[in-house]
Image (cartoon, rainbow, N blue to C red):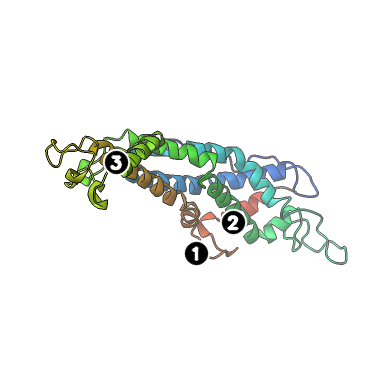
Amino acid sequence: MLVFSLIPFLMAVPVTVQACEGDCIVGITNAFLGNYTGPVHAVLTSIAHQISDLIPSHPDIDTTFGYLQPILSTYQKQAYNGMETAIFPSYFHGKCLDSQGNEPDGCPNPDCPIVCGTPGSLVHFYPKLRFIAYNQTYHLLQDLSAPGTDTYKRVEQAVMDAAASSPGDRRRGYSRIYPRGLTDAVNVAHNNKVSGSAAHPGSGSGPRSGSGSSLDSVPSSRPQGVSEASPSKMLVPVFLKRAQDVQAGLKSIMAQVHGLLGDACGANGVEDTNGLPECSWETEMKEYILSFP
């Protein structure tokens, strides 16, 4: 099974600094990324299970997890820069000075009540820091899972290819699923049906429709109910419908990323900075943050 690379929790040796910079920024950013290894893996595993259910042959989870590799690899490439920017330049930065220009007690450490770029400030406002890390993680996953993106298209193609090569479950009435290249052929068949047929509107509704005898394109000498055009006019649209079902199903599955991460983190559905009990790591993170002077 594909696995995430675990990032060591304590990976930086603190040096004397006046603010969280250098090793402090790198260490705290990587610590949060390492902490989110489990929740992100849980999200992608849930998606892989649902994709397996979507494909008629029900490939194993290792296989369907592999279809998500474009999202996983891009996440790993972009996660660090996004997390660092979200925590530090975007929120925790600057000197710890009050409105009179004085540095309050507890600043820079161990518990600074001013939003600034010091370890003490990160500790004091840890509920906000916790939510920043969660928010950044779900936004990145959600962006990579959005229809139209390169990552989504690559996942979709892998799923469609798997569905196209699947023998299917005949007991449930699955048909072979054709890739997008069949669209032109379907359109030609449909146009032939419209221009060359006087059949009732429902005569081509399925591969076993019994009303094909009224097609004026069929010579009168042909036995009733037999049509040379029936495979292209009837079966192919059914196959295309199966492909469209898979595409729609995948889109619905990928839209669950935010909710699945919320479930993994114990979110209550409200953007509560004191929530996320399964993605808090408060005791360990505060201790680590304060290891930087």
Tag 2: residue type?
Glu
Q: From the viewer's perspective, tell me whether residue 100 is left or right of residue 58.
A: right
Label 2's element? helix
Q: CA distance from mark 3 to mark 2?
A: 72 Å
Q: Of tags 1 and 2, which is closer to the observer?
A: 1
Residue count near mark 3 (Cα–Cα under 10 Å), binned few <14, some 14–19, many ≥20: few
Q: CA distance from mark 1 to mark 2?
A: 18 Å
Q: Which residue is mark 1?
A: 268
Asked if the residue under mark 2 is in contact with the one under mark 3, i.e. CB atoms within 8 Å, the reply is no
Label 3's element? helix
Q: Mark number for residue 245? A: none
Q: Is residue 74 above or below residue 83?
A: above
Residue 10 visible, this angle: no
Tag 1: residue type?
Asn
Image point (76%, 53%), residue name: 93
Q: Which residue is mark 3?
A: 196
In the rendered image, residue 65, in percent from the top left (x then y), is placed at: 42, 39
Q: Which residue is mark 2?
A: 282
In the rendered image, residue 193, in percent from the top left (x then y), is placed at: 30, 42
Query: Which label's residue is closer to the chain start, 3 or 1?
Result: 3
Q: Quadrant of residue 107?
A: bottom right
Q: From the viewer's perspective, tell me whether residue 216 is left or right of residue 108.
A: left
Residue 206 visible, this angle: yes
Q: CA distance from mark 3 to mark 1?
A: 59 Å
- Viewer-closest of 83 and 282: 83
In the rendered image, residue 78, in percent from the top left (x then y), is placed at: 61, 40
Label 1's element? loop
Tag 3: residue type?
Gly
Query: Which label's residue is closer to the chain start, 1 or 2?
Result: 1
